Amino acid sequence: MKKIFIILILSILVSTFPSFKAVGGGFEDAQPENKEWDVRTTSDIVRYASHGNIIYGHEFGFIKKAGNNVDMLWISWSTSEDGLEQFKGKNCTFLIDIDGELFEVELCMVGVYELTTLTTVVFFTNGIASPKLIKALEEGELANIEIVGPKKILDYFDIPSDSFNIDGYVEGRQKAKKLFEELKSQKEKKADEEKIDRGLCQRAKMDLRLGGT
């Protein structure tokens, strides 16, 4: 399981870190307010997310991995504290408030990365949104998200809450679905080509053996 976590995070890191902008050792809301969800891909992962209104580098959204048709919740968060490595693999509880409707979700801390000497970025995923949460995302405009526990982990986050525009969720999900289908098609095509190549190699070896008799 730990190996899966590592592979997943390494695949996402490159597309995530440009979201942060360092300012005087900390981070600011580096981009203007943008209601469109950010949709990015790696070799086999599609991530679609909204950026934080307090800290732009904070992200709330979903990831889709080739070979798995499930949209998993995705949250990235920053802190000036270090020492979170000890909690990798542990669950954290988030309270999501969408236009007054409350949802409590548990996500696994799957990655901890020291972005600078003063800032650590933490990744949470491996949770599936309930149908009620999906409906709220489809109909809502703003999500206020807070890390609420466990306390031993919460104490490491100096900014435990942020807000996210979600009225671009539906369009972002549609874009992600289209990209996911393209990745899936490419992966299947590559698998078919590799299967054909293996077959041709086996046939060539057989011909060589027959020719030598």
Image (cartoon, rainbow, N blue to C red):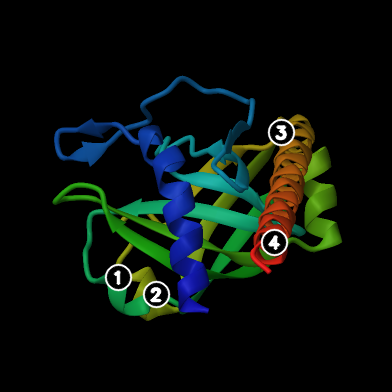
Question: What is the C-alpha distance between the residues marked 1 and 3?
Answer: 31 Å
Please, what is the three-letter code of the amino acid marked with disc 2?
Answer: Lys
Q: Which residue is mark 1?
A: 84
Residue 82 horizontal side relative to residue 18, left or right: left
Q: Secondary structure at mark 4?
A: helix
| C-alpha gap between disc 3 and disc 4 | 45 Å
Write down the residue under mark 4. Answer: 202
Residue on which disc 2 sits: 88
The spot of residue 123 in percent (x, y) is 45, 58
State which tag comes first along the sequence, 2 or 4: 2
Q: Are marks 1 and 3 in contact (CB under 8 Å)?
A: no
- Choose top left, top right, bottom left or bottom right for residue 71: bottom right
Q: Nearer the viewer, mark 2 or mark 4?
A: 4
Disc 2: CA contacts within 10 A as few (<14), some (14-19) or many (>=20): some
Residue located beneath label 3 in the image? 172
- Few, some or many residues within 10 Å of mark 4 (<14, 14–19, 20+): few
Which residue is most to the top? 32
89 vs 136, nearest the viewer = 89
Please identify the quarter of the rendering in which residue 85 is found.
bottom left
